[in-house]
Amino acid sequence: MASAVVPVFLAFFALEHSIEAGLLVLNLRQAHRARGVPLALAGHVGPETADRSRAYALARGRFALVSLLASAVATLVLLLSGVLPWLDRSLAAAGLTGAHLFAAYLAALALAGEVAGVPLALYGTFVLEARFGFNRTTPRLWALDRLKGLLLQAVLGIPLLYAAYGFMRFTGALWWLWLFAFLLLVQVLLTWAYPVLIAPLFNRFEPLPEGALKDRLAGLAEEAGFRNRGLHVMDASRRSGHSNAYFTGLFRPRIVLFDTLVARMTVDEAASVLAHEIGHFRRRHVHRMLALSAAGLFLVLLALSRLVPWPPLYSAFGFRAPSLHAAVALLALGGGSFVFWLSPVAAALSRRQEYEADRFAVQLARAPEALKSALLRLDGENLGNLHPHPWYSAWHHGHPTLIERLDAIDRASATR
């Protein structure tokens, strides 16, 4: 049985990466052949913006191919070179056992992944994003953000590893159900804590200044019955030139606008963007996604509970004996290859929710043209791909294409 584990894994791994690479190549070829502004966007997008969007799509696509290759090589090296069992033996030889070995082993792998990702992250920020005028962060701020992220992972992650070991080791055969309930509670608590305790570690949040924009947005939220913890502006421009808006929280969310969005959009455009975000909340999209995430976590832990006592898994990858930390590491590194086909399902669900939020925005803000101009402005400023390959878009894009969204808004406004 052990002799078949690695070939089966490699077959799924090869299938996953062949499909991902093939879709990237198709998208690159589409962008390479595309010229000018799509007919449906004529008069809305300038030729210079279209050329820059095409160049950005090509650069990001090539970068994604390199990232995919680097990730594949790193995963195969970790799984097949004997590094994982060597790390297990080394930590055990240093005197670590039980929960200490479990936490140290998984923390070491997480740290190694962070370090290995630094070169690509540096290139993406200071070369690719800078080339197109998006990067505004400094090396010092970038390093400080990474350091804060590592410290936050350690402060939150290490206690969680010890807790996970406790559930796996001491709560009997149904440990995975106990661990599921615990991790679900942690997820809900972190969703609550993120805007209050975590996000301010990385960005400054100021109340939206008094004026026409605040009056319009506050009135819109009140009309929709959208109870919230206020309108805030985030200093996104310290790091990037991209624009966006979002809300965070489960029950009384905090509305956050990027300062770049506030500076560039008209009052009606910003109101339409906010109406779209309110639509996500009123249609309970966040709660549905949380429920789907919980279902995924449930299935992952169920699979882990079946793998932990299965000796062929460990011998196939060079471990001398079964262990909890080895099972977690092997599932984390190789499990994605068996469920990668869920990606287009998740993308399709996300696109459906975007259409629903757009329809809600048309009904609430009663300014479909402002919503369309806001989307055109966002897409233009962010250099969105005007010519995505339909297969790549269906597999990966959580948002409909710009043309699809504008057409859907026209239909929604005609039936309003």
Image (cartoon, helix red, strand yellow):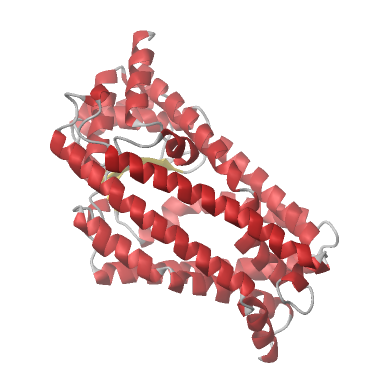
Would you place residue 393 above or below residue 136 in this image? above
Q: Is residue 40 left or right of residue 189?
A: left
- Corner quadrant of residue 327: bottom right
Q: Residue at x 75, y 52 (%)?
A: 302
Q: Position of residue 293 (x, y in %)?
A: 60, 45
- Corner quadrant of residue 404: top left
Q: Nearer the viewer, residue 350 or 256?
A: 350
For this orientation, the residue located farthest to the right is 173
Q: Residue at x 55, y 43 (%)?
A: 343
Q: Quadrant of the C terminus?
A: top left
- Corner quadrant of residue 217: top left
For this orientation, the residue located farthest to the top is 415
Would you place residue 57 above or below residue 311 in this image? above
Q: Residue at x 27, y 36 (%)?
A: 34
**Quick check: can you spot residue 249?**
yes
Q: Nearer the viewer, residue 81 or 145?
A: 81
Q: How many marks?
A: 0
Q: Nearer the viewer, residue 252 or 358?
A: 358
Q: Position of residue 242 (x, y in %)?
A: 26, 47
Q: Is residue 72 left or right of residue 42?
A: right
Q: Residue at x 63, y 72 (%)?
A: 80
Would you place residue 408 above or below residue 304 in this image? above
Q: Quadrant of the N terminus?
A: bottom right
Q: Position of residue 169 (x, y in %)?
A: 79, 69
Q: Position of residue 292 (x, y in %)?
A: 61, 40
**Quick check: can you spot residue 135?**
no
Q: Is residue 293 left or right of residue 180?
A: left
For this orientation, the residue located farthest to the bottom is 94
